[in-house]
Image: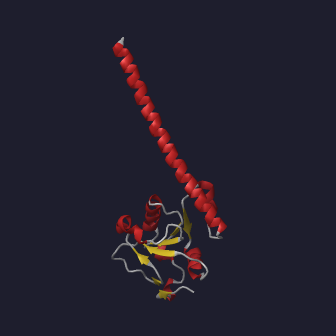
């Protein structure tokens, strides 16, 4: 009898432990979702561009076309950070004024060089793939105002006519 009772108590204890772990995971997901929605609301309030799918699908970062990124870049009234996460040896075909260069491989240890977690960040890479990974990494570090430049430098508008691009 005592053995069956002990086994039953052990089973119940294991079950309770699993339930506690599940509740903890749900709490973490809920907190992340609330933070994300608050950030989206702030972006809307501040008149910043946010894609509908970000709100509807709960996506944590914008995918900007290179044309939309250029519009943002050329708007002197917008405050943002430009981050290049291209491979260390990659030479960008244009120089973007004020760009911070941190390779994707170094971003996990150097992300603190980004002065603000609330200022919008335009994230560039060679073809836009590394910038997606950077967005996902930075989200885990508490950044929400992220904008992946789809296609990266490869599809930057009027690339052949520019060597250096300065903000208006």
- Say which residue appears at 65% left-offset and 65% top-offset: 44
Of all residues, the one furthest to the top in this rendering is 1
Looking at the rendered image, the quarter that the C terminus falls into is bottom right
Colour theme: secondary structure
Along the line of sight, the residue nearer the viewer: 14 or 53: 14
Give above or below for 63 relative to 166.
Answer: above
Q: Is there any visible trace of residue 51 in the rendered image?
A: no
Along the line of sight, the residue nearer the viewer: 143 or 146: 143
Quarter of the image holding residue 141?
bottom left
- Say which residue appears at 37% left-offset and 71% top-offset: 103
Along the line of sight, the residue nearer the viewer: 50 or 160: 50
Residue 73 point in image, percent of width and height: 56, 79
Quarter of the image holding residue 59?
bottom right
Q: Is there any visible trace of residue 25 in the rendered image?
A: yes
Q: Is residue 145 left or right of residue 112?
A: right
Q: Is residue 48 left or right of residue 167?
A: right
Residue 131 point in image, percent of width and height: 45, 67
Residue 58 point in image, percent of width and height: 58, 55
Give above or below for 114 relative to 39.
Answer: below
């Amino acid at each position: 009898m005592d053995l069956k009772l002990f086994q039953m108590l052990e089973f119940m204890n294991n079950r309770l432990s699993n339930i506690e772990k599940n509740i903890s995971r749900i709490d973490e997901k809920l907190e992340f979702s609330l933070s994300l929605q608050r950030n989206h609301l702030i972006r809307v309030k501040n008149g910043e561009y946010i894609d509908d799918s970000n709100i509807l699908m709960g996506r944590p970062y914008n995918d900007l076309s290179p044309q939309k990124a250029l519009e943002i870049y050329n708007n002197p009234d917008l405050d943002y950070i430009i981050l290049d996460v291209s491979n260390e040896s990659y030479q960008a075909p244009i120089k973007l004024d004020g760009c911070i260069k941190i390779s994707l491989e170094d971003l996990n240890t150097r992300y603190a060089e980004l002065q603000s977690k609330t200022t919008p960040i335009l994230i560039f890479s060679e073809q836009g793939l590394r910038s997606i990974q950077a967005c996902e990494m930075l989200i885990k570090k508490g950044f929400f105002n992220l904008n992946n430049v789809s296609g990266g430098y490869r599809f930057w508008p009027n690339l052949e006519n520019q060597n250096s691009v300065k903000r208006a």
